[in-house]
Amino acid sequence: MYAGRPSIVALIVTLLSALVLGAGAAPATAQEPDQVQTVCASCHQDLDVAKFRTFQHGDTVGCLSCHHIGFSNDSARVVAERIEACKSCHNDVSPAHLGVTEGAPSCTTCHSIHSDPPIEDAGPELSARCRTCHETRHAIHAGIPNGPNCTDCHTLHGELHPETTDSTLANRCTACHQPHPTHQRSSEGFPLCLDCHSIDGAPLRDATEEQRSDLCKSCHEVHPTHASVKEGAPLCTDCHSVTSDPPLDSVGPAMSRRCATCHEQAMSQYELGGHAAHVDPGTVQTSVRLQATEHCIQCHSNRKLSEKYGLPVNAVASYEDDYHGATLLFLADNPDAPVQPDVLTCEDCHGPHAVGWSNQKAVSQVCLKCHEKGDPKLAGAWLGHAPVGPKNQLVIWLVRLFYFMLIPTVLIGLTLNILFELRHQRAKGARLRDAIEALPSRFLQRKGRKKTMVPRFSVVERLEHAAGMVVFIMLVITGLPQTQPNGHMSHAIIASFGGIGSIRLIHRIMGFTFVALLVAHVARGVTGAIHKRKIPEIVPRPDDLPKALQMLWHRLKGTPAPKIGRFDFAEKFEYWGLFLGGMVMSVTGISLVWPELITTYLPGIVIAVTRTIHGYEATFAVLVVILWHTWGVILRPEVFPLDTSIFTGKISKERLKEEHRAEYDRLFAEGSDAESAGD
């Protein structure tokens, strides 16, 4: 160790220093290094005093700050004394090694006190020392030229191993690595680096594509369009470049090109089709079938755009009026609703890639994919996108014209009749307001004085009415929302029934129930007529029209009222209107349930006609009931707030005499016990 013999002066200084230390003197002061280190260096010539001062300890620490004459040569004791010497100033022993119970490194295991630069400047040299215990570099960084040093990720003094907190380590990773565009930690739930990368395991770059896809599936569901592919299905990394992809909704044409690596024919068709030549490829996005149809609607609902390219301006409206379009409207605004498998979208007829016109033959092939038992004539049920008119779909135009004339005419006539009756009621002093004000007194009179009641409806008739009322209301509730499925009220009703599929099923069940009630009613009427050998009173008679005119004149001029039988003309009109309308609704409804059967024998246009009639007839029935039936059984002053005869089966003798005088005369003139029957 000694390069030469010490000088006499140095020896004397050393002895004096030893005496001072031996006497318990304090450690060397700031002035000692120049004096003591010169003496020490006279023997320890391998120590460059000038270099020592520029590294770890500078001018404030001298040899005697750590060493003394009695320093032991025993190796175990030397280690302990060195650590104690370091701890006299450095009391923050590295926590990174606190958990090591055996073989824990001492200060000098990592630090060469006489020649080390500051630890933050050590770089690869310090990493080499780390590997004296940690034999290999982390696998994820192995083999990378100029890869990170240990201290780039690990802070040796002051914190625990960084793997104990993923977010801390993720911040250190991003010091060198750009965050993945699809996995940026912008909100909770986004993956951290260690969710995919294992520092001590095999690097992700060395994993197979199947292993990478399995890792993706731990968070992401398999793409729905590829889930059904058994062999050769694309892996996640076939479409997604994890380290450089932006979010999928902003990928645009880049993703389309990746699709083309497998779907070459589809891409070539798309490039030759009608969209690729006119649509900015930057706006093309991947989507499922229903979302793609929404994109079609967004463009084709623009009238100016349609006119510019000579396209049907009625395309969207005609599609939305159709069964399939109505379904999609509901699904588009209710993404959580169960998707109907029988929804026909734009691409089914026009193609998803080589978008173009479709002729009747092509449409029929599309229809038969779902309606497997149908006839190619079924395609005739589709009216196309051109507006219906005298030159296009004449039959449908005539049906619409008929109802456009019928419905307003009938409603105007019923309204005038109500106004005439109101005028007549006012003339004789009976008003609806008076009836409302008189409700309490009328209620007390009914409790105090029991009126004489006469039977009017049998139990069977009352049960028929109750069942028909419930079924009619259910048909209206489940049917009308289907005509406007994108309305707020329709949304709420359809959703309350479990979705568009469920409400259609309930509507059909109610429809068949209505048909059964109608058939039973006809059968009862026919058998009753045969049994009694008498035409039912509800059947129109030759004198009904003259009596109707006489009643109108009575209300306008105050002439004597006609004597009405069991049913007046208004009741017969309503009954036969609903009966005939019910027949029409039954026939058209059945044809819509089984279009395959109908088009086996009849042209497909029949389905379109029956659908048109079914919709208008339902609207007609609802309007008549709301206007006419509500007035007749609720709002008329004589019966307000409700005509209960159809529920109780009885009518007061006074009301029967006033409203059905011919029936009253027949019952009581014949000496029947009708009067006593109601007591």
Image (cartoon, grey):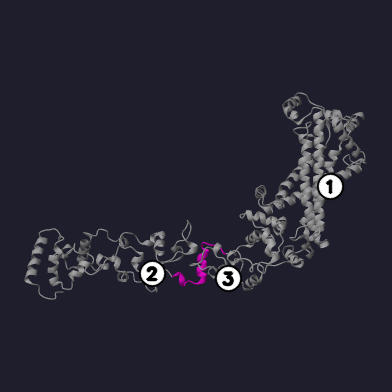
Q: Is residue 528 left or right of residue 199?
A: right
Q: Alpha-carbon distance for marks 2 and 1?
A: 86 Å
Taking the image as shown, residue 469 lies to the left or right of residue 118, namely right
Tell me how far mark 2 sits from mark 3, CA to CA.
37 Å
What residue does disc 2 label? 138
Q: Nearer the viewer, mark 2 or mark 3?
A: 3
The numbered mark, 3 or 1, whose residue comes first in the sequence reads 3
The residue depicted at 18 percent of the width and 69 percent of the height is 50
State the SS at label 3: helix
Which quarter of the image is occupied by the N terminus?
A: bottom left
At label 3, the amino acid type is Arg
Classify mark 3: residues with Cα within 10 Å, few (<14), some (14-19) or many (20+): some
Q: Is residue 414 visible?
A: yes
Say left or right for 398 vs 323: right
In the rendered view, tell whether residue 515 sits above or below residue 667: below
User: Which quadrant would the C terminus be assigned to in this image?
Assistant: top right
Q: Which residues are magenta?
A: 203-222
Q: What secondary structure is found at the residue carrying circle 2?
A: loop
- Residue depth check, mark 3 versus mark 1: number of the one nearer the observer: 3
Secondary structure that dominates the magenta span: helix
User: In what element is the residue under mark 1?
Assistant: helix
Along the viewing direction, whichever of 410 and 60 lies nearer the viewer: 410
Name the amino acid type tagged 1: Leu
| Residue occupied by mark 3 | 257
The first of marks 2 and 3 along the sequence is 2
Can residue 219 be found in the magenta stretch? yes
Q: Residue at x 76, y 60 (%)?
A: 383
Q: x and y percent of residue 647 in the render? A: 78, 36
Q: Residues within 10 Å of mark 2 (few under 14, many from 20)?
A: some
Q: Which quadrant of the figure has residue 49?
A: bottom left
Residue 40 on image: x %, y %: 14, 69
Residue position marked by numbered label 1 in the rendering: 580
